[in-house]
Image (cartoon, rainbow, N blue to C red):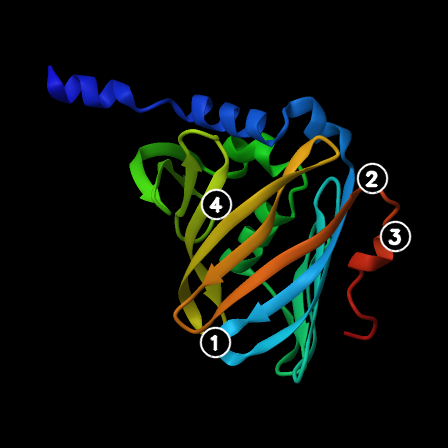
Amino acid sequence: AKPAAAATALPTVDQVLDKYVEALGGKAALEKQTSRSAKGTFEIPAMGMSGTLRTFDKAPNMTSTNIDLAGVGAITIVFNGKQAWQQDPMTGLREMSGPELAMMKIEGEFYAPLKLKSLYKSVEVKGKEKVGGAEAYLVEALPAEGSPVKMYFDVTSGLLVRREAEQDSPQGKMPTELLLEEYRVVDGVKIPFVMKTNTPAMSFVIKIEEVKHNIAIDDAKFAKPSGQ
């Protein structure tokens, strides 16, 4: 009887994901937004480096991240709905493909919280674990290409608080942990204002200072540099 009771203690995938959508503000509130811009800071604490961050997201599936890091220069990461690329002073322009492109397609989806089951081949509740001292449901999602993604949803709030994945990069697979903290309500939707990323190579912190919704964003913002 005890194993059966333990098995029924876990919610279904739909229950976890539905609670997540409600925690963010609800389906209607999310669908009211068609674009989002944010600005803040990008910090690498271990190296004493910091810079500015600007992000632009436009429905249905375009995203641009722009970082200006002191001592390094401008770093741009873009998905325009079909292609994804990164441009920085170290490596120049690099187009993404394979599992890396597949993950950018998911991250570029503007309404991703509403479409998690369709964005992955399979989504399954695996158990319950502690994240920062609080209990969270572990949901494992398998993308069309690449390694499984582990998402941790706070049992009480329903919010996504951690994500783990082996990110594909030119250097090979790299274990990556993303912590999402300090959710705040902007235009009826909760947004994480602090995001901490940890990898074996580097840890960095993004702190959002301002978020705007439903602003006009020219598609040129997501255009690949000419002549490249």
Residue drawn at 44 percent across, 21 percent down: 15
- In the orientation shown, which residue stands out farthest toward the top? 1
> Disc 1 and disc 3: Cα gap in Å?
36 Å
Lower position in the chain sequence, tag 4 or tag 3: 4
Lower position in the chain sequence, tag 1 or tag 4: 1
Lower position in the chain sequence, tag 1 or tag 3: 1
- Kind of residue indicated by mark 2: Asn
Badge 1 crowding class, 10 Å Cα cut-off, few under 14, some 14 to 19, many 20 or more, is few
* Residue highlighted by disc 4: 144
> 78 left or right of 217?
left
- Dot label at residue 46: 1
| Of 100 and 153, the residue lying toward us | 153
Residues under numbered marks 4 and 3 in contact, where contact means CB atoms less than 8 Å apart? no
Q: Is residue 142 above or below residue 168?
A: above
Residue drawn at 86 percent across, 44 percent down: 215
Marks 1, 3: nearer the viewer: 1
The percent position of residue 10, horizontal first and vertical second, equals: 31, 24
The percent position of residue 39, horizontal first and vertical second, equals: 73, 57
- Kind of residue indicated by mark 1: Ala
- Kind of residue indicated by mark 4: Ala
> Disc 3 and disc 2: Cα gap in Å?
12 Å
Helix, strand or loop at disc 3? loop
* Residue highlighted by disc 3: 218
- Kind of residue indicated by mark 3: Asp
* Residue highlighted by disc 2: 214
Q: For residue 49, what is the image quadrant?
A: bottom right
